[in-house]
Image (cartoon, rainbow, N blue to C red):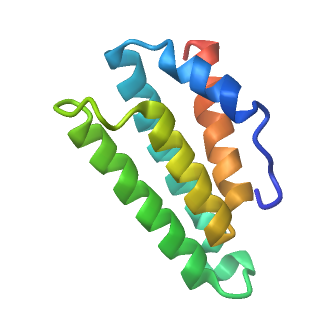
Amino acid sequence: MSGYSVDMNLNDIHQTIASLDREQRERWLIDLGWAMTVAARAGYPLAQQADPIPHLMAFNEMQHQLFNYLRDSRTRDDWTIEAFIDGLCQKAKVSGVEGDFGWALNYALKKLTSGQ
């Protein structure tokens, strides 16, 4: 998974996700959370990472943000999906897990567009 890049640019991702209704968006966020769990496993000690702890910590924090967004976006209008996605992408980049997060993001987007 490492070294994976996001197939769509951030503007395309924003447009795709912003066009979803609430239920579709929640399903997409759940799929993204699932894919992030899989991507985090690249940081397991047996995955041959030099230091797996920062990798796992980064995904743990991003998943925490994802669940906060799922919980809080129902009652708040000031946390847009675009700002949320930007924040996750920035966190992944700063944390050095951009490739594995890119895989998770692509998985969730492909699942969304394939209608599964």
52 relative to 98 in the view: left or right: left
Q: Residue at x 78, y 61 (%)?
A: 2
x, y (%) of residue 68?
A: 28, 49
Q: Residue furthest front?
A: 78
Q: Nearer the viewer, residue 48 or 53?
A: 53
Q: Residue furthest left?
A: 75
Q: Residue furthest right?
A: 3
- For the N terminus, give its image quadrant: bottom right
User: Is 30 above or below relative to 46?
Assistant: above
Residue 23: image quadrant is top left
x, y (%) of residue 27?
A: 40, 26
User: Is 98 above or below relative to 70?
Assistant: below
x, y (%) of residue 81?
A: 44, 32
Q: Residue furthest bottom?
A: 51
Q: Residue at x 60, y 19 (%)?
A: 15
- Number of numbered discs: 0
Q: Residue at x 68, y 34 (%)?
A: 10
101 relative to 21 in the view: left or right: right
12 relative to 33 in the view: left or right: right
User: Is 1 above or below relative to 86?
Assistant: below
Residue 65: image quadrant is bottom left
74 relative to 45 in the view: left or right: left
- For the C terminus, give its image quadrant: top right
x, y (%) of residue 21?
A: 38, 12
Q: Residue at x 59, y 18 (%)?
A: 16
